Image (cartoon, grey):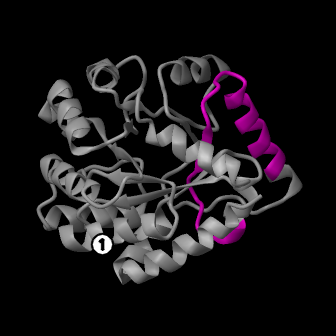
Amino acid sequence: MSDDRVAAAFARARSEGRAALVAYLTAYDGGPEHSLACVRAAIDAGADVIELGIPFSDPSADGPAICAAMVRARAHGATVDRVLELLATLRRSHDAAVVLFGYANPMLHKGGEAFAAAAAQAGADGVLVVDAPPESAGPLREPARAHGLHWIPLVAPTTTAERRTLITAGGSGFVYAITLAGVTGAALQEQGSAADATLRAQLEATRAVTSLPVAAGFGVRRRTQVVRLAALADGVVVGTALVEAAQRGPRAVTELVHELREGCLR
């Protein structure tokens, strides 16, 4: 991939002695102007990769905060095409890595080829589809690859070794390692030797089957949790806390990203 912003983001973080900060925000939450301002604030404050959420009516993997954000976004008229227009607008001012995060249904409704072509044209660097297992991902994965988009794989604590190999083999960019069973915003287990050993074993099992950077997320809300994960993973994913900050405005996003980025230092 010629201008690989995702690889560059992780390489830059590694060279600076820190984990990459992967920041999730729901597109159109608060309306297009508010949403765009919050994404810009996150990038300007130091987020390395943006996960831009595509609102969906049935976000089964998400907890109350992100579900509510998707309801608000849809009330403001969010559609796949409008999210891509927002991304294209962002690209006129910012060059950070952006991964489109969402569910298969809206993407397939547009059509796998049409979605991938439009996403690439808008300036996306990759796609992360939370409900597309490798056996059924082809209609979205193959067009994404053909248009130069990363296909970001997800692995969970319950993923078997065999499936971990299968899932990561079909991906590129980075691996999203879900740190707990449940939905987004659930509480990450507090720090402790047993908890850290479990996390370390999970991440090492993923690294054993892929050379891709591994970003850990789900349940990350505080700087102390970021510090803990930054010592174990190549990147730290934060979503719910940023979505809640975005409700307060771009300044709150800036303040939180500054705090989280400091926690990424090793």
Identify the residue under disc 1: 37
In the figure, 145 relative to 35: above or below? above
- The answer to whether residue 162 is left or right of residue 55 is right
Q: How many marks?
A: 1
Q: Quadrant of residue 220?
A: bottom right
Which of 179/31 is in front?
Answer: 31
* Residue 259: image location, x then y, percent: 61, 74
Asked if residue 210 is among those painted magenta in the image, a careful observer would answer yes
Q: Residue at x 60, y 48 (%)?
A: 12
Magenta residue span? 196-224
Q: Residue at x 47, y 20 (%)?
A: 170
Q: Quadrant of the C terminus?
A: bottom right
Q: Quadrant of the N terminus?
A: top left
Label 1 Cα neighbours within 10 Å, binned few <14 / some 14-19 / many ≥20 = some
SS for dot 1: helix
* Residue 62: image location, x then y, percent: 41, 54
In the figure, 43 relative to 232: above or below? below
Kind of residue at disc 1: Ala
Q: Residue at x 62, y 16 (%)?
A: 162
Which of 171/73 is in front?
Answer: 171
Which of 139/148 is in front?
Answer: 148
Q: Quadrant of residue 168?
A: top right
Q: Quadrant of residue 161?
A: top right
Asked if one can make out residue 142 in the rendered structure from this viewpoint, the answer is: yes
* Residue 80: image location, x then y, percent: 17, 47
Q: Residue at x 62, y 34 (%)?
A: 158
Asked if residue 5 is among those painted magenta in the image, a careful observer would answer no
Asked if one can make out residue 180 in the rendered structure from this viewpoint, the answer is: no
In the figure, 70 relative to 235: above or below? below
* Residue 101: image location, x then y, percent: 36, 46
- The answer to whether residue 137 is left or right of residue 184 is left
